[in-house]
Amino acid sequence: MQLAFHQVDAFSDRPFGGNPAMVYRLDAWLADDLMQRIAAEHNLAETAFLVREGQHWHIRWFTPTTEVPLCGHATLASAHVLFEVYHETVERLDFTCRSGALSVTREGDRLWLDFPAMVPSEFGASLVVQAALGVEAVDVLSANELFVVLESEQAVLDCKPDMAALAKLPWPGAIVTAPGSRHDFVSRYFAPAIGINEDPVTGSTHCSLIPYWSRRLGKLGLTAYQCSARGGELFCRLEGERVKIGGNARLVASGTLMLG
């Protein structure tokens, strides 16, 4: 069996920026353990698998160690592959996944994810959390992820988590965020519990970042930067109970996986 794959740098308009994701468009689902082994072989933060179901695409995402319920950058990468490699002519692609209905709309060179908003709730200051992240927090909240607000962009850049301690906390990952100097806000995302020490650019974390910063800054439209080593810029909108997350993508590699 041979399977075509495509690697995309999501949330970047150039190679070697943003967050790389591997994309497989399948005719039918592979066994779960095989998809997991394929993701481990590529060893990227996420590998996405797509199967068409009527007018929708069913999408699943795997890290090198586990399946995850939602992944923004690999959804953006998948849409880019469907548009650029498989020449989908519609302007909106609809996806279904474990987290519900998602869509990606093409507007010029930019792709817009439509995801559910997840408003973080107060968790309270925690010495254990601050010790694991090596930070002094302004606020500690919780959504699907640990959500830690810091004083400044420099504090986000300086964050050096204890990955072993962070992996023991009862969240899949931790967002650290602060007001930005050239963007409305900046963030980083650490998820050692699911095999990702630091994710370069994370679309799904912006499901909670956007409503938080929209309320705090009094703006519905925001710009964001995830200040990892690779880095990536995101364009954000809050629309009721949904968030729109915009970004560019670049196809950087295509090939064939040969399974015998």
Image: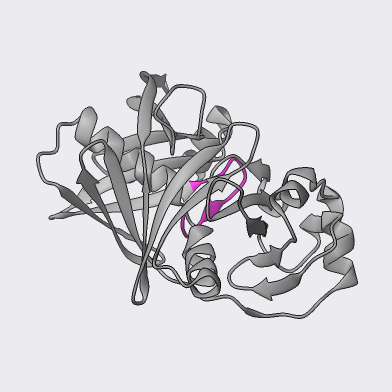
Specify whether residue 68 is painted magenta: yes
Q: Let me know if residue 45 appears in the view.
A: yes
Q: Nearer the viewer, residue 118 or 63?
A: 118
In the displayed structure, does residue 198 sit left or right of residue 204? right
Task: Name the image quarter holding the N terminus.
Answer: top left
Q: Position of residue 210 (x, y in %)?
A: 48, 64
In the displayed structure, does residue 101 sit left or right of residue 162? left
Specify whether residue 25 is painted magenta: no
Q: Nearer the viewer, residue 97 or 215?
A: 215
- The residue at the point 74 percent across, 72 percent down is 139
Q: Let me know if residue 202 appears in the view.
A: no
- The residue at the point 82 percent across, 45 percent down is 160
Q: Position of residue 7 (x, y in %)?
A: 41, 27
Q: Nearer the viewer, residue 130 or 23?
A: 130
- The residue at the point 11 percent across, 45 percent down is 90
In the displayed structure, does residue 255 sit left or right of residue 133? left
- How many numbered discs sit on the rendered protein? 0
Q: In the picture shown, does residue 97 fall above or below 123?
A: above
Q: Position of residue 244 (x, y in %)?
A: 35, 59
Q: Quadrant of residue 89?
A: top left
Q: In the picture shown, does residue 83 fall above or below 224?
A: above
**Which residues lie in the magenta part?**
62-71
Q: In the picture shown, does residue 203 fall above or below 256?
A: below
In the displayed structure, does residue 177 sit left or right of residue 20? right
Q: Nearer the viewer, residue 167 or 147?
A: 147
Task: Name the image quarter holding the C terminus.
Answer: top left
Q: Position of residue 156 (x, y in %)?
A: 72, 50
Residue at the far left in the pictured view: 89
Q: Main secondary structure of the magenta part?
A: loop
